[in-house]
Image (spheres, rainbow, N blue to C red):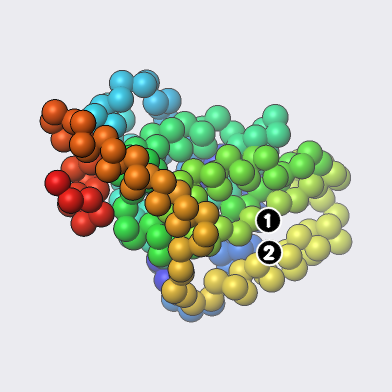
Amino acid sequence: MKIVVINGTEIKGCTYHLKECFLNSLDGENTITEFYLPKDAPHFCCGCKTCFFKSENLCPHAKYIMPIWNAILAADLLVFTYPVYALHAPGQVKALLDHLCCHWMVHRPEKVMFKKRAVILTQSIGAPNGTAQKDVATSLTWMGVSSIKTLGFGLMEGVIWEELSEKRKQQMKLKIKKLASKYQNVKTVQKNLKVKMFFFMSKIMHKKTLKTEKQISADNQHWIEQGWLVK
């Protein structure tokens, strides 16, 4: 199984150890590609809209973003792991997601994304994890990922892994191993209702814009090439 891991922090603390527990709990021969933010995607989107109007390959930050995107396209399982900052995902995670918006269904979705599974692992000192997980889950859903599972922890005892009690560590590891047991093999994924609905809405939108465009947009050209629209 090909796995891509997006680490939302370069610090090898609690988040890192939880992620390692998940990866080490996966059986079989897996190919794991990891990216660490912000090192591997150090720039914010500058809002030039080049990716929307022309191509993501012409993005000013393409040399950072395209290797990540190509790895995502080639993967069977996507793992996003990050700490919770101010009840949301860290800014560096949002910066990456901003660069990938051109692959949302309202723009240029990729067919292979409909078959992928994703896991989101988060931790906080004690704040709810749901909103921070939703930041990534929303983007993945709009990119066509139907199978997304989340697992978050409120550490409470502290933010230093070595200072957590063995009891607390074991509790978290058991939950992570239970989640990992669902990802021992590549499985066929069917579009869920939400993804089907988003795709249907997007198709209607593209059909309408295609009728009025004097020059076919990059988005509509992509939909035509995928066989989803007819000129």
What residue sits 43% from the left and 53% below the top? 144
- Pick the residue in front: 225 or 136: 225
Q: CA distance from mark 2 to mark 1?
A: 8 Å
The numbered dot on residue 176 is 2
**In the visual, does 225 lie left or right of 147?**
left
Q: Which tag, 2 or 1, sits closer to the chain's start?
A: 1
How many numbered marks have been drawn onto this rendered protein structure?
2
**In the visual, does 58 lie left or right of 167?**
left
What residue sits 61% from the left and 59% below the top? 149
Q: Where in the figure is residue 168, as x and y percent of width and height?
A: 83, 57
Query: Quarter of the image containing the N terminus?
Result: bottom left
Q: Which amino acid is tagged 1?
A: Leu
Quarter-wise, where is residue 182 in the image? Answer: bottom right
What residue sits 31% from the left and 21% below the top? 48
Q: Which amino acid is tagged 2?
A: Ile
**In the visual, does 109 lie left or right of 121?**
left
Q: Where in the figure is residue 129, as x and y percent of width and height?
A: 71, 44
What residue sits 56% from the left and 58% below the top? 148
Q: Is residue 148 visible?
A: yes
Q: Where in the figure is residue 224, as x and y percent of width and height?
A: 19, 49
Quarter-wise, where is residue 128 in the image? Answer: top right
Q: Which residue is mark 1?
A: 151
Density class for disc 1 (Cα within 10 Å; few <14, some 14-19, many ≥20) is some
- Pick the residue in front: 200 or 146: 200
Q: Secondary structure at mark 2?
A: helix
**In the visual, does 16 lie left or right of 172?**
left
Density class for disc 2 (Cα within 10 Å; few <14, some 14-19, many ≥20) is many
Q: Secondary structure at mark 1?
A: strand
- Pick the residue in front: 47 or 214: 214
Camera-nearest label, 2 or 1? 1
Q: Is residue 56 visible?
A: no
Dot 2 and dot 1 residues touching (CB under 8 Å)? yes
